[in-house]
Image (cartoon, rainbow, N blue to C red):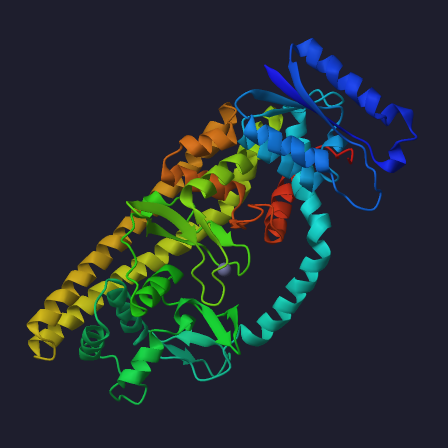
Amino acid sequence: MKAVIYIRVSTTEQASSNQSLPVQESKARGLCQQRGLHVLRLFADKGESARTDDRPQFKKMMEYCRQHRREISHVVVSDLSRLARNVLDQGQTIVALTEMGIALVSVDEPNLDDSAAGRLLKNVLGSMNQFFSDSLSEKTKDRMAAGVKQGRWLWVAPLGYQNDTRTKQIVTDSERSPLVRKAFELLAEGKSIGDVMRQVTALGLATRKGRHIPKQTFSRLIRNPFYCGWIENNGTRVRGTHDPLISEEIFNTVQQRLSGKAPTQIVRDDFPLRGFVQCWKCGNNLTAGMVKGRSKSYPRYWCWTPRCRSTSVTAEELEKQTYHLFHILQPGARTLAMLPTLAARTWDVRKERIAADAKSLVRRLDEQNTLNQRAIKARLMGELSEEDFKSFKASTEAETERLQEQIRALDSERSTMEELVKQADREIIDLGESWRSAPPRRKREIQTALFPEGLAYDPESGYFTPRNHSFCQSFITMLEQASLVGVPDGI
Ligand SMILES: [Zn+2]
């Protein structure tokens, strides 16, 4: 086994003898000897300048590790604070080394592998708070102020919704909303605008005054992100307070089709991180699909939000990063044993969510039935051609099946969570490994149990992005509430 030693001293520390380079070196060499590690190279940063934070040797060391990753088994430091100037950097460095399959050993923190995990968790994630809290709280404030103003639609409700004059809220128009939703579903299936317009018109979609919907109006309707929950105004986009009629996924699929780029048909379960990982910039969920390469297609995740599109990453890279994040989160045996408690806490909330979801799915099933009956009637009345009727019926059946599948998935989520809670009671799990080896549905269970609100991803810095601060913070809070993490001794 071969090791690399890294030592560092800042100009202010040079006076103090117990931090001097020779002391650090001899400590590190001592450990290598003790563990039978052959020292390949030593890198020393002497902190010539107190003002710049250049660590040329550190960079060289990391580069060297990358080039000789197969040979090197360990990086040895005398204590963690040598490794990087702050805990965030430490976290990133450890992730980078872990990725290369290189273990980090610290003389002063002999239990790094075990106990430091909890501490690392706390420090790496906790420091995000400290690092980003200023800029973030400002942004959040602005965003919230804007949200109050713009999250509520102040104008006449789009078709499929109504203005509730009493509450001043936008409410769903139960008469038209099923038809608007159906229009999006049909378009997502790849039907042409003309066909879809004809079908929903035959089934009774009309303006509030009972008039025929002009083509232009319909064309605007199917491009309006209001239907998937967004309010766009003056180039800004905010979450509306109204109930979306369709999922963002369906909306995006329709937009892709309208722009002439037919999305590749994707198997849902191929992308466990879909709906979990968000764009670091706009915060919307990443979309996923197969992207054509030269000779074959590759799975990829990317931001599909107009005017953003800031994130794009291969599925392989994103999954690798996720694995490493969960791996460094691995909080030691004691904390892991408490995971079921944590999971149980979010579990109550999720049970409620599942119940609500199930209810709305059942309602949507009813809707499909009603639409189906309407179609039959319209066909009998001769308002719908045989061809349109057939294609409409096929779509209703497909949608019914999809809804039933989702209801089944909810049932399975229920039981998986219960199982996970029980199982974690008995065994110690390597979070990274159990995530990696899990089937897609189970992957979702694990990632959502850890981060119920998902995580943002930045191609530059991975999961170490300011947007994750609040999620990470809530995770830490959960740990603290369960008194699982000791007070960190501040590096
Ligand atoms: Zn984005």
Give coordinates of residue 300: x percent, y percent: 39, 48
Pick the residue in front: 479 or 3.
3
Q: Who's the residue at 43% across and 42% down the image?
A: 444
Could you tell whether 220 is left or right of 349 in the image?
A: left
Give coordinates of residue 103: x percent, y percent: 60, 24
Q: In this view, does 213 lie above or below 402?
A: below
State the count of labels. 0
Give coordinates of residue 73: x percent, y percent: 58, 20
One can see residue 330 in this view? no
Could you tell whether 395 is left or right of 222 in the image?
A: left
- The residue most toward the right is 15
One can see residue 45 in this view? yes
Quadrant housing residue 121: top right
Could you tell whether 313 is left or right of 369 in the image?
A: right
Quadrant housing residue 335: top right
Pick the residue in front: 470 or 62.
62
Q: Who's the residue at 74% across and 40% down the image?
A: 86
Give coordinates of residue 213: x percent, y percent: 27, 85
Could you tell whether 17 is left or right of 484 in the image?
A: right
